[in-house]
Image (cartoon, rainbow, N blue to C red):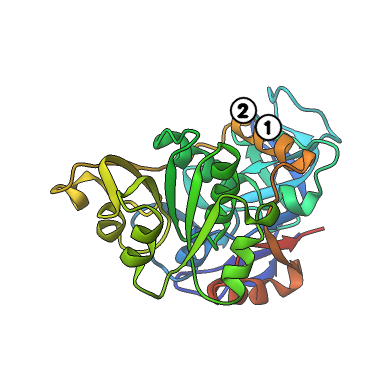
Amino acid sequence: MRAVTVDSVPGAPAVTELDIPRPEAGELLVKVGAASLNGIDIAAAAGYVQGLMEHRFPMVFGGDFAGTVEALGEGAHGFAVGDAVFGVVMKPFLGAGSLAEYVVVPAGHGVAPLPAGLAVTDAGALGVAGATAVDSLDAVALTQGETVLISGAGGGVGSLAVQLAAARGAKVIATARPGAQTDFVTGLTDSGTGIHVVDFTGDLETQVRAIAPDGVDAALHLAGDIAQLAGLLRAGGRIASTLGATQEAVKDLEVTVHTIMADPNASTLTVLAEQAASGALRVPVAATYPLDRAAEAFAAFSSGTPGKIAVACA
């Protein structure tokens, strides 16, 4: 099968030929229709996560996937050959990813049925970013009428979080770069309802205080300086960090930090898929590349292209 791999890190991802993996007990073999890139793929290629997770070479990149069940390992329950599925590769090591024609995943976690009405490309870009957005908003317990600051709104997680927060009835202050990224974020919901986009490159405090003079209720730290974001919270505010920040980073402020490790369980994936299939949630796929042009997909992601970068693997 074709797969996007490196033989060592740091390294340049390239398409190579590998044997089709075999599902072990409790696993599914999925023929991948689409996958997408996430920050960990870029970080892994650059060698930034060495020592944090086991690497197995040749290392196949990719976490998100959508496709069709091709075979079942012994004792794999809940799915049948031919089922359309999507999800996230949930393994304790890097190397058996989804940027390939086939991927093996656990049947019991990180996979859910692909509903009718949800395009394979969208499903293949939904799992990691969607679960991270949901878990971040749940961690700060965002409710109707509150104001949330989303730093990094132009990325995959941020663009989904903007929509989910607006759907909860929150006022959203989203950071984005001027130009195409700002236009992209503004267009995430109908008429930009409830969304205030501020210039990430400008005076963030002045811009945010003009909208929320007493401070925001919650913040999502998807990019930028957590200390700066925490300083824009009201006393008692909450902040969720997907970048590993902890309470120690804001120890002098009366705010609570939640460090996010997303859990793409079947329940969360199912709800996200239903929302996307119904049109209530837009999966922000900015561009789709064929598997043979995966190097271009990595370059587009690294250049800061807004939204998600998908890869068609079939």
**Foreground pick, 207 / 143:** 207
Reading the image, the residue beneath label 1 is: 270
The CA span between labels 1 and 2 is 5 Å
The location of residue 86, given as percent across then percent down, is: 71, 41
**Foreground pick, 117 / 76:** 117
What residue lies at 25% left-to-right and 55% top-to-bottom? 231
What residue lies at 22% left-to-right and 44% top-to-bottom? 247
- Amino acid type of the residue that numbered disc 1 sits on in the rendered structure: Thr
Circle 1 residues within 10 Å: few <14, some 14–19, many ≥20: many
The location of residue 152, given as percent across then percent down, is: 47, 61
Q: Are marks 1 and 2 in contact (CB under 8 Å)?
A: yes
**Foreground pick, 86 / 9:** 86
Q: Is mark 2 on a helix, strand or loop?
A: helix
Q: Is residue 258 left or right of residue 168?
A: left
Q: Is residue 27 left or right of residue 265?
A: right
The location of residue 5, given as percent across then percent down, is: 60, 66
Residue 312 shows in this picture: yes
- Amino acid type of the residue that numbered disc 2 sits on in the rendered structure: Ser
What residue lies at 75% left-to-right and 72% top-to-bottom? 292
Count how many numbered circles sit on residues in the image: 2
The location of residue 189, given as percent across then percent down, is: 66, 52
State the image quarter where residue 105 is shown.
top right
Image quadrant containing the C terminus: bottom right
Q: Is residue 261 left or right of residue 118?
A: left
Q: What element carries label 1?
A: helix
Q: Which residue lies furthest to the left in this view?
A: 252
What residue lies at 34% left-to-right and 72% top-to-bottom? 203
- Residue 14 is labelled as none
Circle 2 residues within 10 Å: few <14, some 14–19, many ≥20: few
State the image quarter where residue 188 is shown.
bottom right
Reading the image, the residue beneath label 2 is: 267
